[in-house]
Image: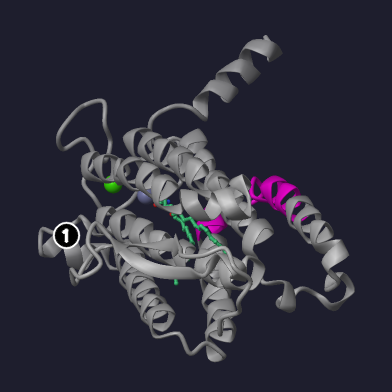
Amino acid sequence: MGGMYSIEKMSRVFSYQSSDIDWCEDNYQHSENVVEFFNTMSSFFFFIVSPLMLYLLHPYAKERNLAVHMVWVMMIFVGIFSAYFHMTLSFVGQMLDELSILWVIAVGYALWFPRKLFPSFIKDRRYTFCFSKLVMILTVVTTLVSFVKPTANAYALNCFGLHFLYTLAIEMRSCTDRRALRLAKLSVGLWVLAISCWISDRFGCSFWQKLNFCYLHSLWHIFIVMAVAYATTLIAYLDANYEIPYSLPGLQYWPCDKWPVGVPHIVLKGTTKTHKRC
Ligand SMILES: CCCCCCCC/C=C\CCCCCCCC(=O)N[C@@H](CO)[C@H](O)/C=C/CCCCCCCCCCCCC
Ligand SMILES: [Ca+2]
Ligand SMILES: [Zn+2]
């Protein structure tokens, strides 16, 4: 009897709308199996951008470390879990969505956090591995803590965005490379657009419902993927200048460098040992 009760309780976490969160988009408007249709569909944007980023970052990853591909491989899973969450609004969907974001951020920090900003006790090159280990231990602990108050997770995750902006500001202070500075401004601009949509959807829903425009969370999906694409290229570029300067890293835009819009990527122009400014 007790066993039956706990199985029933367990399966409830998979059921539709078992999550505490419900985004502004009206539920079941376009299908009886999909709770938030546009939020689900816009999650597929992750699938378009992730393979493109894996392709564009490949020359840098080959020279530096193939492990950097983990970030965009994991972003595919973020897309899958995000689509599942908005399709069902289930508790399991919410946790998968949030925890996959947490792990992408953790891998990003373990791979790219600038050594000069390491805590003083692990600043030495020999202990770089310790930093990654520390990040992973903290992430395992945070994963367990995230079950205590699931509604707070999304806000906690957004704080990483703020910490990332702070780290970027310190990094860019000493940078004179015009292309890198422009990319930093574009990344921050996209992040500001994204976070404004997320906050507005969360807290201004009644206003947007009056205007009959409840798609801000879908726009958040699109802007945040673009912000992450721009920001990861910038971080990878700064990292390449620091760790593999002999490869003469440069920044270009895909598909055509001369177009006013495009996806940024790194080109490696050389193999001789020279230094750059960032
Ligand atoms: C030196 C450090 C390098 C760090 C690299 C970071 C790499 C990748 C980071 C983030 C992945 C973000 C993925 C967003 C997925 C959105 C899915 C979603 O919509 N989930 C919502 C529910 O559907 C949920 O409420 C969202 C929660 C908040 C997520 C906050 C993500 C913070 C992202 C920080 C990105 C920084 C980019 C800033 C550019 C200047
Ligand atoms: Ca909704
Ligand atoms: Zn979402």
Q: Quadrant of the N terminus?
A: top right
Quarter occupied by residue 48: top left
Q: Kindly identify which residue carries mark 1.
A: 209
Q: Kindly identify the residue that appears in the image at 48 percent across and 90 percent down.
A: 176
Q: Amino acid at mark 1?
A: Gln
Q: Position of residue 200 (x, y in %)?
A: 30, 68
Screen quadrant of the C terminus: bottom right
The answer to whether residue 88 of the structure is visible from this angle is: yes
Residue found 44% across the figure and 40% down from its top = 76
What secondary structure is the magenta-colored segment mainly?
helix
Kindly give the residue lying farthest to the front in the view shown.
Answer: 272
Callout 1: helix, strand or loop?
A: helix
Mark 1 CB within 8 Å of ligand 2: no
Say which of 263 and 7 sits in front: 263
Residue 74 shown left or right of residue 27 in the figure: right
Q: Position of residue 242 (x, y in %)?
A: 63, 73
Question: For the point 25% across and 67% down, which residue is it?
Answer: 257
Residue 150 seen by the camera: no
What percent of the width, then of the height, locates residue 35?
28, 36
Q: Quadrant of residue 277?
A: bottom right
Magenta range? 138-154
**Residue 167 in the figure: left or right of residue 24:** right
Q: Nearer the viewer, residue 201 or 142?
A: 142
